[in-house]
Image: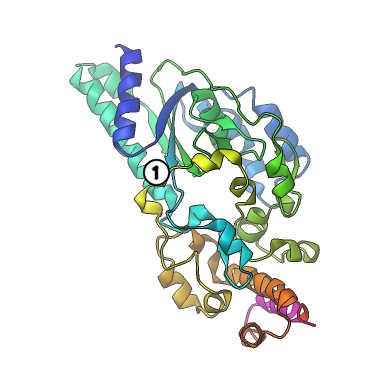
Amino acid sequence: MDFAALAQNIKRWGQALGFAEIGIASAEVSAATPSLMHWLALGRHGEMDYMAKHAALRANPQALVAGTVSVIAARLPYWPEAADGVQTLANAELGYISRYALGRDYHKTIRNRLQKLADRIHAEIQAQGRAALAEAFVYRVFSDSAPVMEVEFARQSGIAWHGKHTLSLSKTGSWHFLGEIYTSLPLPPDEPIAEHCGDCHRCLDACPTAAIVAPYEVDARRCISYLTIELHGAIPVELRPLIGNRIYGCDDCQLCCPWNKFAQIGDPDFAVRHQLDATPLTTLFAWSATEFEARLAGSPLRRIGHERWLRNIAVALGNALRTSPQNPEIINALAAQRTHASTLVREHVLWALDQGN
């Protein structure tokens, strides 16, 4: 079979499904594995135990999916129209939510489209009369859903490079999701593109908690995305004032990146829902557990649950009190949760109330 021609068709079919770019990489990550192991050895993964538990699978694609030879890497933009991150961050009474989480949960969107792409590949193999190849065709689709070195495959496949903030970057910025298909097909790999960060260090300078400890190195234990999403317990007291009004994730290292001036408006699936980019913290804090589940159906925000949602917002409200100590709306909102059933919520509420003193 002409696998070079098939690779070109895969890219064309992928773009027809809405992906901005498709690339091919070999299923080989030995060049990136030492950095992963060093990061884990330093404990920079914090409480993300799954990172250490599944490190061997991440470092060996064939152990995750037997027979994997090639990786089809995909990039899908998500920048939501009219979601001005800088403006929201500047208003302490609004809750800042990472731009990727304002719309639909990306996991299903990307995996569904990659499944359609895999089905199209299988159909093409059958149409060419390659019955044995079609029978032996092994694949699995991913999008931040298994131990896969997504940024490394994006780099190898030429659809992005590895930014100093550790995210993937292209000449249209970093506001994109990545997805992959592990496959047994021996597709010809693409060439990596050159990195274009140069001497720029804006992302390091912009990080509110100095979590980007060096170019290409992030200590998750200080990262606001980790603190507000991955961390299950109390947010360290010394880091709370640095979180500002960020209640789910953080985009500062992206908002300052020069390449994001060229960002494309993202896929419609990721358009802002429920005015999440412009809702007062006090309104969000008043949501009951039932309202949280109902309003955020189909949203990635649901993964943290109502308890951590309140924990995060309490910190943001406390930081708002620092600049507006006598704000009765904020004080009343916090006071209403002083007797919350959760010890975690109560502790953060009391801390927040103290910020107004």
Q: Which residue is mark 1?
A: 110
Q: x%, y% of residue 85?
A: 55, 57
Left or right of 148? Residue 223 is right
Residue 8 horizontal side relative to residue 306, left or right: left
The quadrant of the image that shows the C terminus is bottom right
* Residue 353: percent from left, percent from top: 73, 81
Above or below, comparing residue 279 to residue 350 in the picture: above
Query: Does residue 112 show up magenta in the picture?
Result: no
Query: Taking the image as drawn, is residue 15 in sight?
Result: yes
Q: Secondary structure at mark 1?
A: helix
Residue 346 lies within the magenta run: yes
Q: Residue furthest top?
A: 2
Dominant secondary structure, magenta: helix
Tell me the residue at 48%/66% (across/down).
276
Disc count in the image? 1
Above or below for 49 versus 241? above
Q: In the image, what residue type sits under mark 1?
A: Ile
Q: Nearer the viewer, residue 335 or 169?
A: 169
Q: Position of residue 333 (x, y in %)?
A: 61, 84
Q: Which image quarter holds the N terminus?
A: top left
What's drawn in magenta, residue-wise?
A: 341-353
